Amino acid sequence: MGFEEKKRHQATDIVRGAIDGDPVTGAISVPIYQSATFRHPSLGETTGWDYTRQSNPTRTALEAHLALLEKGARGFAFSSGMAAMSAVLDLMRTGDHVILSEDLYGGTWRLFDELARARGIFFDFVDTTDNGAAEAAFRKETRLLIVETPSNPMMRVSDLRALARIARAKGAILVVDNTFMTPFLQRPLELGAHIVLHSGTKYLAGHNDTLCGFLVCSDEALGERIALIQKTTGAVLSPFESWLAIRGIKTLALRMERQQRNAGELAERLSAHPAVAAVHYVGLPSHPGYGLCRKQASGFGAMISFGLRDPGRVPGVLAGVRLILFAESLGGVESLITYPMTQTHAAMPAEYRKRLGVDEGLLRLSVGIEDVRDLWDDLRGALEA
Ligand SMILES: Cc1ncc(COP(=O)(O)O)c(C=O)c1O
């Protein structure tokens, strides 16, 4: 059996996967096809490429790569994670009902609260870590179940196999936002989900320099529906940014391994610090989702949130960090600290945030690839200033 036919490991596919450079010139890097349109050889003939909103060779290489990494039938690259989530919403019709994890990215919350509601699409936010609660939320109009796991920002873990069984029994589509884990650590389609979503802005592109979003679906029929939405609404990823995403993804496994190791160490150190009331990191054996995460993923990722004993010290910590940057994103090589209450989750009503635990003392840390000793020095200095 040749190497081509053997099943390759995910870390190899992440670098090579469906990205084969340019067959014409032998270029290792996929060329940037910076063209809006493509010439037809003659009437009724096409080179296979017609107009970039529909498809573009650079974007297609990236989409095929994502499909391969997530083990799906087709991949789609959008101009942002929210554009990808909007395409999911476009699968719905007036009168349809959607169930979403209650603890999830504030922008997804706003998309439903502002736009879905205005279109007459019904929705409920539910604790999807509770399979019974998720099942009980289904109505006969329910078409979608949208789950984030681990969730943003409380790092709650939902049981993807169980939720896939429930969604399938009810004839609904299970969408998993896999932004925090990436296909290096967790592959929801293999666990029974129908669609995986990414804010590719985060770990996939990986360098805090590119906004992008992805959908990967499990079957061709769903792929046809998403392709129609993508080419019709047009929020596609540009050729240049597709290339940046391809370049970023090639180092995903290396980055993730380092980021995860750093996160594990910082989570332990934070847990032992007297200024810290609670640490939410899935990789701590004391985390309620630790065991489940081990069953459905091959790692814990590099996102931590933690609560300060004295919320009055939040401004001091945010002003005190030097190496760790106070900014609103995650997943890149630089470590970032975020204040969910006024940043990522500002769109949520206060009482809703409070119920989830997104309170005045909560900070979220996206751990980067820096030397962990420098990260801890910086964080400890800010906590003790
Ligand atoms: C889990 C999650 N999903 C989706 C999004 C939206 O992605 P984007 O900012 O690329 O539009 C984000 C952004 O922070 C996110 O954290």
Image (cartoon, helix red, strand yellow):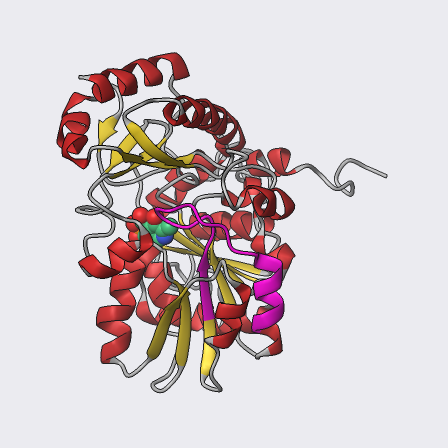
Residue at figure coordinates x 13%, y 31% from the top left? 315
Q: Where is residue 338 in the image (x, y as percent from the top left)?
A: 25, 37
Q: Which residue lies furthest to the right in this view?
A: 1
Looking at the rendered image, the quarter that the C terminus falls into is top left
Q: Nearer the viewer, residue 282 or 31?
A: 282
Q: Which of 351 and 12 is in front in this view?
A: 351
The verdict on residue 10 being magenta is: no
Q: Where is residue 31 in the image (x, y as percent from the top left)?
A: 44, 40
Say how many tags the image has.
0
Q: Which of 344 and 290 is in front in this view?
A: 290
The verdict on residue 162 being magenta is: yes
Residue 34 at least partly seen: no
Q: Left of 86 or right of it: where is 146? A: right
Which quadrant of the view contains residue 331?
top left
Residue at figure coordinates x 17%, y 46% from the top left? 342
Looking at the rendered image, the quarter that the N terminus falls into is top right
Q: In this view, does 14 lie above or below 320?
A: below
Which quadrant of the view contains residue 141?
bottom left
Residue 17 at least partly seen: yes
Q: Left of 342 or right of it: where is 128? A: right
Q: Position of residue 209 (x, y in %)?
A: 29, 36
Residue at figure coordinates x 42%, y 38% from the top left? 203
Question: Where are the magenta residues, as a range?
Answer: 145-167
Q: Left of 221 or right of it: where is 323? A: left
Q: Position of residue 14 (x, y in %)?
A: 56, 37
Q: Is residue 103 above or below residue 295?
A: below
Q: In this view, does 184 lie above or below 358?
A: above
